Amino acid sequence: MKNNKILFIIIILLVFSAGCSAFFDKGDTIPTDEPPLVSKPESASEGTPDGEGDIYFTVMIHLEGWDDARSEEKFERHAELVREYASLFETYGAVMTLESKEFTDGCIQWGDNVLKEMETRGHGIGLHADQGGSKKQSFEEFNRKVGEMKKQLESLDVTVRHVSGVSSDKDWVKVCIDNGFEAVTGVVSYSLWSLDESLRPVGFEPYASPKEGHAAYPWDPAMTIMPWRTSSGSDWIINDEAGKLIIIPSGLGLTAAYEEMNGLTEGGAGFEFDIKDIEAWRDKLDELLAYTDSNTVNTYYAAWSLGGPVDTDLLEKWLQMIDEYVRDGRIIWTNIPDMIDIYNAG
């Protein structure tokens, strides 16, 4: 009888220890432990990461909030900044990924195809849909609007393979797949609403809106360099090798890194870009590189909503700091569409 009790206790301990992960391979135990929850996707190598990998890196820029279609003056200023920053980035071999929302309308309305120009110059183009966040919106409307926005962006003769701004309580993964997207970026905690209730990780809250649940997911920094595949919004935190959609986790905000790393903000809005952000970025990159594995594809990107101009001298200092890692062979500049190809090949 005593031996049976000991065996029972051992079994219980094994069951609890098996549940500690940020997302799970299909068939694994449902999460039961406190966050941060750490695991690896099936595509990652077995064992402890060797810390010798490199990171494919870009800056994901949301082009929104400028009233581009109704004000030619605002669109021209928006376009001017995009071109100015692109030229600065190119000086350091750096690559941007531009995710367009209202900027698409401006390019069409005013006959200036900035996005095609940027793609020709080697920068990536994607869609920032900003759809699905209202629980009043039906799945059908959500799906239709994302499809219409993709077609409109493609009318500018650019290739559109990924999307952001689709966090929803509905099956946002199906929306992406239905509309031919290969990857999704900018996934935030609000997306956890779409999961089967039993799969929602400890730490999930009943977020009222994407703005309220704007913290990037996965929450564990070790997982933010590991893309994975999914087939359904009901279990998207579980890696599915047969999944048609790649989730490329979101990174730190470019201009509010210090605040984000110190828990002062989520999403990077309303804070001035300064030298503390550059120092915070260096700390973050050093941390992330320790999580890399030379046998896996590691990705990361800075998130930036281009709501207004930034200090270009500071931006150049940031690029110079990143360039140190590039010259050391630890950071490789690319864009999101190329990350898709690299991940598929890897």
Image: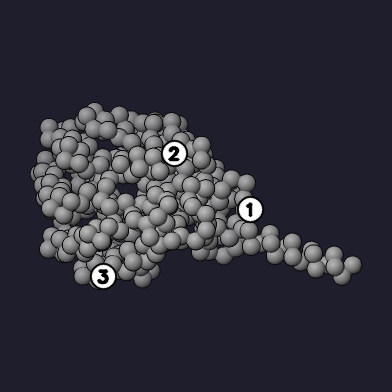
Q: Which residue in the structure is indicated by mark 3?
A: 279
What crowding class fits label 1: few (fewer than 14 Cα within 10 Å), some (14-19), or many (20 or more)? some
What crowding class fits label 2: few (fewer than 14 Cα within 10 Å), some (14-19), or many (20 or more)? many
- The disc placed on residue 245 is 2
Residue at 36 percent of width and 31 percent of height: 147
Horizontal side of 338 relative to 346 (left or right) equals left
Specify which label sits upstream in the sequence, 1 or 3: 1
Question: Marks 1/2: CA distance?
Answer: 23 Å
> Residue 177's image quarter?
top left
Residue at 87 percent of width and 70 percent of height: 2
Callout 1 secondary element: loop
In front: 272, or 19? 19
Question: What type is the residue that disc 3 sits on?
Answer: Glu
Specify which label sits upstream in the sequence, 1 or 2: 1
The spot of residue 168 in percent (x, y) is 45, 45
Quadrant of image for the N terminus: bottom right
The spot of residue 257 in percent (x, y) is 30, 65
Q: Is residue 1 above or below residue 227?
A: below
Quadrant of image for the C terminus: top left
- The disc placed on residue 29 is 1
Horizontal side of 273 relative to 83 (left or right) equals right
Q: Is residue 234 above or below residue 50?
A: above
The spot of residue 133 in percent (x, y) is 42, 45
